[in-house]
């Protein structure tokens, strides 16, 4: 899912993900996202000359994944700590946290909650609501399963990836960085452990 979520975003960004809304899921297998093996990364043009890239270091959430139950049994809820943005430059990160961009004092989290999945156990199209900078919009993107199976510690894991391209102005993030920085490409990589 090439999640292009402008402005360092994630989004929410963001990645790998999974499938339709948990509100539709009752008896599907539930998974806890492993925050140490899941990543929301982004990049956007810098002045039209090169790329500025970064990531969000703190993510959490749950997903349901049970292909035997059909597409309605697949879903994800993702929560990203906007304050955890990291572009490898402290002053820039401070600016990104300010009211010019993410305004983390008022909007501390970025969330994505799936509403529908169209596909099979290997991937498909994921629809959902992305909330960023206090604005909620429906989005969709392609997701693909990376793999699943038992881990060395007795658990069972599944991993997905997805990509999305986000336009900053759609989420009222209008700080002028030039036309090349209007869009943000977001990559989402999610690994989750069956509960």
Image (tube, helix red, strand yellow):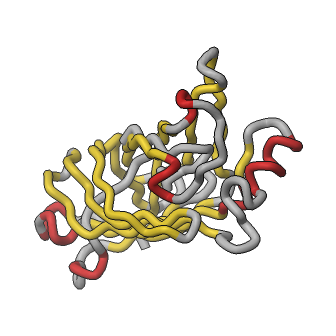
Q: Quadrant of residue 112?
A: bottom left
The residue furthest top is 49
- Location of residue 12 with respect to 178 vertically, above or below: below
Quadrant showing the N terminus: top left
Inspect this view and state whether residue 32 appears: no
Residue 119, position in %: x, y? 14, 52
Quadrant showing the C terminus: bottom left
Q: Nearer the viewer, residue 1 or 138?
A: 138
Q: Nearer the viewer, residue 35 or 13?
A: 13
User: Who's the residue at 28% across and 72% down the image?
Assistant: 21
User: Who's the residue at 75% across and 56% down the image?
Assistant: 97
The residue furthest right is 91
Q: Quadrant of residue 181?
A: top right
Q: Nearer the viewer, residue 18 or 94?
A: 94
Residue 128, position in %: x, y? 31, 64
- Location of residue 43 with respect to 26 vertically, above or below: above
Q: Nearer the viewer, residue 25 or 30?
A: 25
User: Who's the residue at 44% across and 45% down the image?
Assistant: 166
Inspect this view and state whether residue 43 appears: yes
- Location of residue 73 with respect to 8 vertically, above or below: below
Residue 168 lies left or right of residue 86; in this view the side is: left
Residue 175 lies left or right of residue 116; in this view the side is: right
Residue 130, position in %: x, y? 42, 63
How many marks are shown on the rendered structure?
Answer: 0
User: Who's the residue at 83% across and 51% down the image?
Assistant: 94
């Amino acid at each position: 899912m090439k999640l292009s979520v402008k402005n360092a975003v994630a989004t929410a960004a963001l990645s790998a993900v999974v499938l339709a809304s948990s509100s539709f899921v009752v008896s599907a297998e539930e998974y806890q996202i492993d925050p140490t093996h899941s990543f929301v990364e982004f990049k956007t043009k810098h002045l039209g000359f090169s790329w500025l890239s970064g990531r969000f270091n703190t993510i959490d959430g749950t997903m349901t994944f049970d292909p035997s139950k059909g597409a309605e049994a697949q879903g994800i809820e993702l929560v990203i700590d906007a304050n955890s943005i990291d572009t490898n430059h402290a002053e820039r990160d401070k600016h990104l946290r300010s009211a010019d961009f993410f305004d983390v004092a008022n909007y501390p989290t970025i969330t994505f909650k799936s509403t529908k999945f169209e596909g099979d156990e290997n991937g498909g199209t994921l629809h959902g609501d992305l909330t960023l900078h206090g604005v909620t919009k429906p989005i969709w993107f392609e997701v693909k399963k990376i793999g699943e199976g038992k881990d060395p510690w007795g658990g069972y894991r599944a991993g997905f990836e997805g990509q999305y391209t986000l336009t900053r102005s759609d989420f009222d993030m209008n700080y002028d960085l030039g036309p090349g920085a209007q869009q943000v490409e977001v990559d989402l990589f999610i690994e989750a452990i069956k509960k």
